[in-house]
Image (cartoon, grey):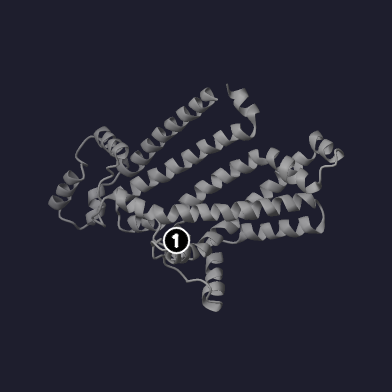
């Protein structure tokens, strides 16, 4: 197991290093002067040169890269050009919303998808299967932002059960935390609909494939109930492709909240990136993109570890 983890960890480090080089090349080396972009095309050349010196743009590329990597390792990400505050503080403040939002959306996705996928597979080629798969097709076709607007019109404008947007923080009392949780429900649901529809179809296909195996027929011959066969035997053996999709979806939820956060006016990481791009705050964009890339790589690492936990044959074959 230790050799398996060591190989996966080495892959993780190599991928992070490669991602950092790509992010640096795209935002720092491509043609164009960052100082000129920040100050505008009509800025005084002397002021542009002074800003370039302040930003370290007069230094060699490899020096700037190592300075940035050193800052990442020590937590010194620099100061935002537009906000005038440390980038690390800005990111941590926004992650306090984006991470719970992504986790809540992933929980809703998992619960809905597993229930729909397993139920559809247990009623293969019956009316229930056709109806549920039809609903998932509709869910895949619905854009997140459009479904978010529908949720606002129904639950905020008409029924007035939830606020139409905004986030006042997690607070310190249970009432304040409950209010914060309620403000994330509609955004999480709007994110979960499409992801749940996709995952449900993968779950159904994986479950149907496993249901044809000999051990399933053996379990049924021993008198094991249909529900126990589905949820205890079939689903576990069908989880490998399902977890693969779940890992990619969670990464996408972390990185793809920009539109939904703007619809609900949530001060999350996606909205920070959107504002940084609008303000040409390249240092914020660079560190946020690297953070999202790290999230994706780490999630994939966790998925690889879960493979070995669910199916020991994968671990054994990799050693």
Q: Is residue 276 left or right of residue 252?
A: left
User: x, y (%) of residue 55?
Assistant: 21, 45
Residue situated in front as seen by the camera: 130 or 101? 101
The residue at which mark 1 appears reads as 261
| Left or right: 242 as drawn, with respect to 292 | right
Classify residue 291 by image quadrant. Answer: top left
Whether residue 222 is visible to the viewer of this picture, yes or no, is: yes
User: Observer-nearest residue: 58 or 188?
Assistant: 188
Secondary element under disc 1, as helix, strand or loop, is helix
Q: Residue at x 51, y 71 (%)?
A: 162
Above or below, 246 relative to 116: above
* Relative image position of residue 4 (x, y in whole percent): 54, 25
Q: Residue furthest right?
A: 221
Q: Is residue 213 above or below residue 178?
A: above
Examine the rendered structure and indicate whether residue 154 appears above or below residue 50. Answer: below
Query: Residue at left 23%, top 55%?
Result: 84
Image side of residue 59 versus residue 180, left or right: left
- The image shows residue 118 at horizontal and vertical percentages of 72, 50
Q: Residue furthest front?
A: 173
x%, y% of residue 134? 72, 59
Can the viewer see residue 195 in this picture? no
């Amino acid at each position: 197991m230790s050799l398996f983890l060591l190989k996966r960890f080495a892959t993780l480090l190599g991928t992070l290093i490669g991602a950092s080089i790509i992010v640096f090349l795209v935002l720092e080396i491509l043609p164009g002067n960052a100082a000129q972009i920040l100050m505008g095309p009509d800025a005084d050349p002397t002021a542009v040169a002074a800003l370039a010196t302040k930003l370290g743009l007069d230094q060699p590329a490899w020096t700037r890269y190592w300075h940035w990597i050193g800052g990442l390792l020590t937590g010194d990400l620099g100061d935002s050009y537009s906000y005038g505050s440390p980038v690390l503080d800005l990111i941590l403040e926004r992650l306090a919303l984006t991470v719970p939002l992504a986790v809540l959306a992933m929980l809703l996705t998992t619960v809905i998808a597993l229930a729909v996928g397993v139920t559809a597979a247990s009623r293969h080629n019956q009316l229930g299967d056709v109806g549920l798969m039809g609903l998932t097709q509709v869910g895949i076709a619905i854009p997140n932002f459009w479904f978010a607007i529908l949720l606002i019109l129904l639950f905020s404008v008409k029924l007035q059960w939830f606020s139409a947007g905004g986030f006042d923080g997690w607070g310190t009392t249970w009432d304040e935390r409950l209010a914060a949780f309620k403000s994330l429900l509609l955004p999480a649901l709007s994110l979960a609909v499409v992801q749940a529809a996709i995952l449900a179809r993968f779950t159904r296909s994986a479950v149907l494939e496993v249901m044809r195996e000999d051990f399933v027929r053996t379990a049924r011959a021993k008198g094991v109930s249909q529900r126990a066969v589905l949820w205890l035997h079939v689903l576990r053996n069908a989880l490998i492709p399902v977890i693969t999709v779940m890992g990619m979806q969670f990464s996408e939820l972390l990185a793809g909240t920009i539109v939904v956060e703007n619809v609900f006016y949530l001060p999350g990481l996606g909205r920070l990136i959107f504002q940084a791009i609008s303000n040409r705050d390249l240092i914020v964009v660079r560190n946020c993109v690297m953070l999202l890339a790290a999230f994706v790589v780490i999630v994939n690492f966790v998925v690889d570890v879960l493979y070995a936990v669910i199916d020991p044959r994968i671990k054994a074959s990799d050693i």
